[in-house]
Amino acid sequence: MVFALAGAAYQLPRLRAQEADLHVSLEKARQRPALPVRAVSPPSLLTQLPSEAELPALLAQIVEAARLQEVPLGQSDYSYLPAEAGTPPRLQLRLDTLAPYAGVRRFVNQVVLTQPAVALTGFSTSRESDAQPVPRVRLVFEVYYRSAP
């Protein structure tokens, strides 16, 4: 124990000198002028949306996602919703299918995770009788896009 105390006492002046050097370095760093920061505005959300001309390809990708997840699409329809205050124009896509819930869930996940401009806004299921093996599912997607100037 005596040797440990003697060793610590021997190291103490060197450790205090290192601590003083660190305080001096910290004070110098505080006195340096900050680097100028340029204001960079992020790209507008609207510029990141697909253009109106890209909508057919995007819709084809949604149909392909349904095929890959083995979700047969039945009667489907769409309507255009004009731009409103603060909202870009959008295409509302209504899809009907008779498919197992797990496949529909995989399809929805694939669409919303791979297409950032597409949002699921409606999801309903119904079963007409206990004899119907899979539910009837209605999905409503909204596809936001940039209209041509």
Image (cartoon, helix red, strand yellow):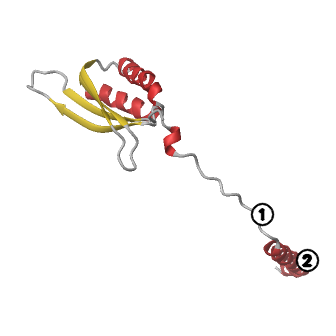
Label annotation for residue 14: 2
The residue nearer to you, when weighing 69 against 147, is 147
Q: Are marks 2 and 1 in contact (CB under 8 Å)?
A: no
| Residue 122 sits in quarter | top left
Q: Secondary structure at mark 2?
A: helix
Quadrant location of the N terminus? bottom right
Tag 1, which secondary structure? loop
Q: Mark 1 highlights which residue?
A: 35
Q: Is residue 62 left or right of residue 24?
A: left
Instruction: Give the mark nearer the N terminus: 2 vs 1.
Output: 2
Q: Can see residue 80? A: yes
Residue 28, image x, y percentages: 85, 74
Task: Please say if 73 is above or below 89.
Answer: above
Measuring from the top left, give residue 126's x and y in whole percent: 15, 31
Q: Amino acid at mark 2?
A: Arg
Q: Is residue 82 left or right of residue 138?
A: right
Kind of residue sitting beneath label 1? Leu
Q: Residue furthest front?
A: 149
Q: Quadrant of residue 3?
A: bottom right
Vertical placement of residue 31 versus 109, above or below: below
Q: x, y percentage for residue 98?
A: 22, 21
Q: How far is mark 2 from mark 1, CA to CA?
A: 34 Å
Crowding at label 1, few (<14), some or many (≥20) Cα neighbours within 10 Å?
A: few
Q: Position of residue 20 (x, y in %)?
A: 86, 79
Query: Which residue is at 84% across, 81% downward?
Result: 5
Q: Please tell me which residue lies in front, 42 or 66.
A: 42
Image position of 9 (left or right of 66):
right
Which mark lies nearer to you, 2 or 1?
1
**Residue at image location 44% in from the left, 36% down from the top:** 117
